Image: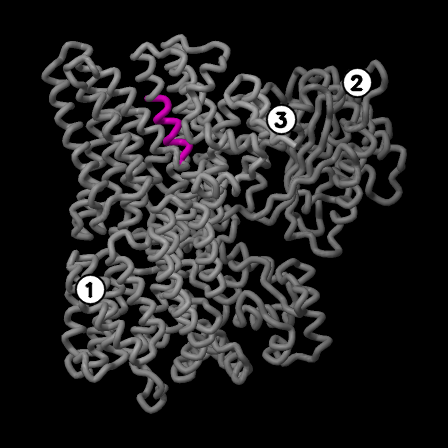
Amino acid sequence: MAQTFGTPLIGRAGELTRLTDVLARARTGTPRSVLVSGDAGVGKTRLLTEAAAHAARTEMTVLTGHCVDLGDVGLPYLPFTEILGTLAADDRFAAAFAAHPAVDRLLGARTGTPRTGADTGTGTDTGTGADPGGTPGTDPGTRLRLFEGVAALLAAVAEITPLLLVLEDLHWADQSSRDLLRFLLSRGLLQPSAPGAPAHRLAIFASYRADDLHRRHPLRPLLAELVRLPAVDRLELRPMADAEVARLVRALRAEVLSDTTVRRIVERAEGNAFYAEELLAALPGDVDPSATAMPSGLADVLLIRIEQLSDTAQQVLRTAAVAGRRVEHGLLHDAVQLPQDTLESALREAVGRQLLVPGEDGTYSFRHALTREAVYADLLPGERVRLHRTFAGLLTGRARSAERAHHSRESHDLADALAASLEAADHAQLLGAPAEELRHLEAVLELWSAVDPGARPRTAGPVTLTLRAAAAAARAGDAHRAVALTRAALARAGSDADSELAARVRYTLAGHLMRVDSTKAAYTYSSEALAMIPAEPASHTWVWAAATHVMAARYMGHDEDAHRVARQALRTAEELRLPDAQADLIISLVGLDGGNRRTPRGRERLRRARDLAREAGNVSVEMRALFNLAIGCYESGTLDECLTWLSEGLERADRSGLLSSPYALELRYLQSLILYTLGRWDECARAAASDAERLPPAGGFAVGPALYVALARGEEGTVERARALLDGPFDWMASLVAGIVLTDAAALRGDAEGAVAALRESLAGLSDVTGSERPDIGVRLAALALSPVADTAVRLRSAGDASGALRWAATATELVELARTTAAKGEDGTRQGPEGLAWLARAEAEWSRACPPADGTAEERAVAAWERTVSAFDYGDPYELARSRRRFAEALLAAGRREEAAGQARAARDTADRLGAVPLREEVDALIRRGRLAGPASAADRVAALTARESDVLRLLARGRTNRQIGEELFISGKTASVHVSNILAKLGAAGRTEAVAIAYREGLIEPEPTASA
């Protein structure tokens, strides 16, 4: 097969593996056949080409036969004459041909003359190419001898060389070729060889188009027969996944394509590789993603099949194309205005040709969207307008306003299109579908100026509608679009707007600006809104303006102003009985009381806010309360309770259609972060994979912790994926995730300069936008960057480069000071929780390596610093605990405490193994080899490896306590207790809790408790 491709095979790795496995078995004497099916353009030829290339590389002889569409005048045995002709030209097989002269008849059919001197055994060969077995009057015995001769010849060839036969486009095969294939697969080549005979080293791959097999297609009964044979497999090529089509499109173009362009091609191609290539090739030179014209070459390919239908069937198909991808039988009947029996006959024809697919709900769908596009594009302009007007009229009065809006617009009835679009937006809002609501509202705004004022709806004006569109954009996860729409509302309002509307536009804009981290501009607009309306008399607008201003002032660090306005607004909200505004203000006040959401009292206030918001039906404020409850639990280390709030929040978002809203995205990020922190990495990665397709473009940060997993496991491309989060408009959370990955990646490769640069760049971006001098993440970034900095200082000191070591020691001091100040007084002005303090402990320990004291206590201090770090990370982060154990083991080894070092190293390695953290495991293995720490674990090792908290857990484990009971007795969460139990099992080498207790008694780690006297 000579065809070559310039791009790698994409999206078919599993299918190719199946074929190469068949080839491997064939080479060892287990013959098999695979029937490869799929729609035209889905990639059958490319897959078979790759399989054939693999076969050739493994020294198989590859022969290909093609079936050709010649209508009713088919050439008999065409694919087999092509195969035999190739074989006959190879001198290796001359003896085989001489031994099986019956096949000369097919070679004569190929050339138009019989082979010279060949004895066909019939005496009837005229050399005309006539079917020797399919024409009337031909001797059936001749046909059988021919079939047996072909089978024997191919078996003889397979003795000389492993053989792959590829038959392409069986849907065009003639009757004789189908009969010969049936014989070869059912009675000949694939059957077990006789005892003592050589095995057949043969594979047969045959492809056919599934979309060409109408109900009466002659290939259908043959396929039904063949797939029942034990040596015949079926491989269906389904449409490619969207992600794979996107990879294909990018691989086909040297220049960079925008995400919008790629997404548009992917949507239209619907998994078909050929369609994707044609759509890409038809792009104009400037790669305009808005171009919707059907490529002429592709349209011609698609329309050829439509033109084979009767005139009535084509009329029905054209009418269905105007309806859309899918149409109900009743609606189509009313639109096409044909007698029922005539319509059904036409539909049966279209379904039989696999152009339409019937649904169980009385509908018909085009098999592929591009088929519908081609038919629609082929309509005459007047015909198109007439049919759209027909459908718009038929849909009037039905609850299908979105479809009616489309048909009214295409039939130039803009007033009805405006009214229907507004109805569709209302319906989408009721269903909790913000993206669809936004689309319909944008259509309303676009039509507004084109419709006569008397025909416009009187329920809302353009400013109110624009604000509503902005709210829908925010709920759909497109915060930047929400900002743009609200700015448009501000421009529409102008100077003539009343003060309440002007204030509403400004505080709404402030709220959206905070979502894109433009806090300074948000504070400006919230201040303007608050100044436009008086606090007295009390009003709904003033309360919400005040609530928004409180948030903006807090972000800007104006806490005193925020406190004053919040308390006043809360009193007014209570007076006006606005429960959702009360809830919003309570949440802000909890945040203003530094660290309060980490306390039981603070979370009780947040629960009250949640209940108030739920009572008012304000899901957005309810989500804000749930987020604060979850993050407060996370910051205080109560991860079990945090997961409970996360589940409630995401369930509420799902029920309300708000999974792409800002707080839902942050809840998803936090859930992913906890899975990472608890060492449930496979769950974290699976959740990220399932969420990736559903997240809005600006929500990539929500699966950021999966990047932490990928980095820790050494997966390629992680850094590039992190950098991709920085593309597009600035996003605070995306920058935070990218900063962590890029800093840690530099640290893992020992690049001190790169780690420090990544830290500074990340903190600069996060600080510039929020105005905070100390983003909380600074303590983690400082600890990560300190690792390669300390390594560099140690290396230079050992090499005698005192000045270089001092320079990096100064950098280390700068970083540890950043960690100290951030941990002591972060963004909300309070000391950080258990996680932040653990990172601070690690930063201090790394600094002690870079700046050892000169009084001879360096080794002792290093041991103490890393012991504190191990203890700090014992709150429930197994990966960072293992990384700290590795450093602790180094410090113990340097201090000569080998047995303790061995225990810590083993514990770190066990965790690295369990998590799949390959780079960490390799580092620990190198330490074990370098320090000669390998050897059987003794009881002393195990005692040294258990922390004080783990020893407490072990004693309660021996008493038969559950994880929840252990947590209650030690005042920790059940989840944290579970992590301790897992660590104990790993350190003791136990398979379960009972075995761990038995080992602990045997090694003297715990003493049996005395029993009470009778």
Which numbered disc, 2 or 3, marks the residue that appears first in the sequence? 3
Q: Is residue 230 magenta?
A: no
Callout in the foreground (1, 3): 1
The disc labelled 2 sits on which kind of residue? Ala
Image position of 575 with respect to 211: above or below: below
Residue beneath disc 1? 563
Structure colour scheme:
one colour
Q: CA distance from mark 1 to mark 2?
A: 101 Å
Quarter assignment of residue 76:
top right
Q: Residues within 10 Å of mark 3 (few under 14, many from 20)?
A: many
Residue range of the region highlighted in magenta in the rendering: 877-887
The residue nearer to you, when weighing 592 against 444, is 592
Give the residue at the far left of this rendering. Answer: 803
**Which residue is identified by label 2?**
99
Real-space Cα distance between discs 2 and 3?
22 Å
Residue that label 3 marks = 62
| Few, some or many residues within 10 Å of mark 2 (<14, 14–19, 20+) | few
Mark earlier in primary sequence (1, 2):
2
**Mark 2 residue element:** helix
* Residue type (three-letter) at the residue carrying disc 3: Val
Query: In the drawing, does residue 575 fall left or right of residue 660?
Result: left
Residue at (37, 64) in percent of width and height: 475
Task: Give how far across and how far down residue 654 sits, in percent.
Answer: 48, 60
